[in-house]
Amino acid sequence: MKRTMLMLTLLVLAGALVFAGGRSEAAPDRKIAAMATDVGGLGDQSFNDGAYQGLLLGAPYGFEARVVESNQQTDYIPNLSGLAEDGAEIVFAVGFLMEDAVKEAARMHPDTLFGGIDIGGDDDLPNFQGILYREEQSGYLAGVLAGLMTKEHASAIPRLRPEHNVVGAVLGMLVPPVERFEVGFIQGVKSVNPDATVLSVTAGSFVDQAAGREAALAMIEQGADIVFQAAGLTGLGAIQAADEEGVLAIGVDIDQNHVAPDAVLTSAIKKIPESVEVVLRSVAEGTFQGGTVSYGLAEDATGLAPFHGFDSMIPQEVKDALEAARQGILDGSIEIATSRSQIRHLID
């Protein structure tokens, strides 16, 4: 197996946000927390990077981070198994596409703990914990913001084009987490702006920035002034297009404002680093459990990133609407569908 290992031991702030041993070939007082990336690899500024940041948060619990990058899907099982064989206390797989591989690796290495981002757990795998997120909640809030800003409050930001009333979504592949983001986004837009047009394109890849850029450019040409992306590395191309064309973008997974501060209005986030930290803490404390955990607004794990330089431009009326939507999701008065089949009346 080709392994290009990145090995880092970093001190991190002990006050990191938290919502609420075993064998090692490292130094006796250290344990290895490892991950195999999806094909997007490190530098996607999305779910792979988010999981890696989570590994770094394990330093106060005695973990050092080890990462192997996957170049193709056939690398998944060898990479995951290799990390287990090299003495990792716990090995994470990142992304829905790694589901079969990580579960196979967990069966092959029952004495190693495994975790999966965007992957559900199995009752017959006590050494595997699947971590899911309620992405539709973040998507819905992003949609409320886009729906209000593209038309009614477009005068607040020069990059908006109120004469069109069009927004768009660039997707990587239509796997369940991405579908939940998209479906939530569409519902959020339509809840506040039923006449808005929501364009959606699936690029078919999480690693093709050129495809993301072209998809976003096509939407912008059709009048879209806010482009939401849920596409991993592909989505960076969509943000680039929005920045180049003088419109706005909404990032995904982690706060992506740094990618294009003049264009990224906010990001529909899920707190991957913090949820990885929770798992590492449970491993350190001996309380790790298999199965599935699901995080959402109630756990402060989904939502919107800060508005950064746009904060003063967002009208208070819009901020109030976002808070009302958040409360409605929390108290159950707003129910959000999670699949396209449930919102055919909004997309047909």
Image (cartoon, rainbow, N blue to C red):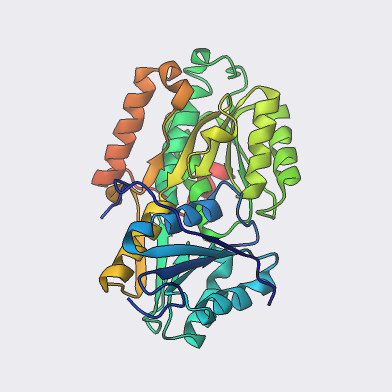
Instruction: Report the number of numbered marks.
Output: 0
Return the residue nearer the eye: 169 or 341. 169
Residue 136 in view here = yes
- Who's the residue at 62% across and 24% down the image? 247
Quarter placement of the N terminus: bottom right
Residue 201 in view here = no
From this view, report whether residue 94 is shown above or below residue 19.
Answer: below
Return the residue nearer the eye: 1 or 197. 1
* Residue 18 rendering spot, x and y as whole percentages: 29, 51
From this view, report whether residue 91 is shown above or below residue 211.
Answer: below
* Residue 22 rendering spot, x and y as whole percentages: 35, 79
The quarter of the picture where residue 258 lies is top right
From this view, report whether residue 212 is shown above or below residue 119.
Answer: above
Quarter placement of the C terminus: top right
The quarter of the picture where residue 33 lies is bottom left
* Residue 277 rendering spot, x and y as whole percentages: 36, 58
- Who's the residue at 52% across and 20% down the image? 151
Farthest-out residue, front: 27
* Residue 215 rendering spot, x and y as whole percentages: 71, 40
- Who's the residue at 70% across and 64% down the image? 71
From this view, report whether residue 185 is shown above or below residue 20.
Answer: above
- Who's the residue at 39% across and 17% down the image? 315
Return the residue nearer the eye: 270 or 65. 65
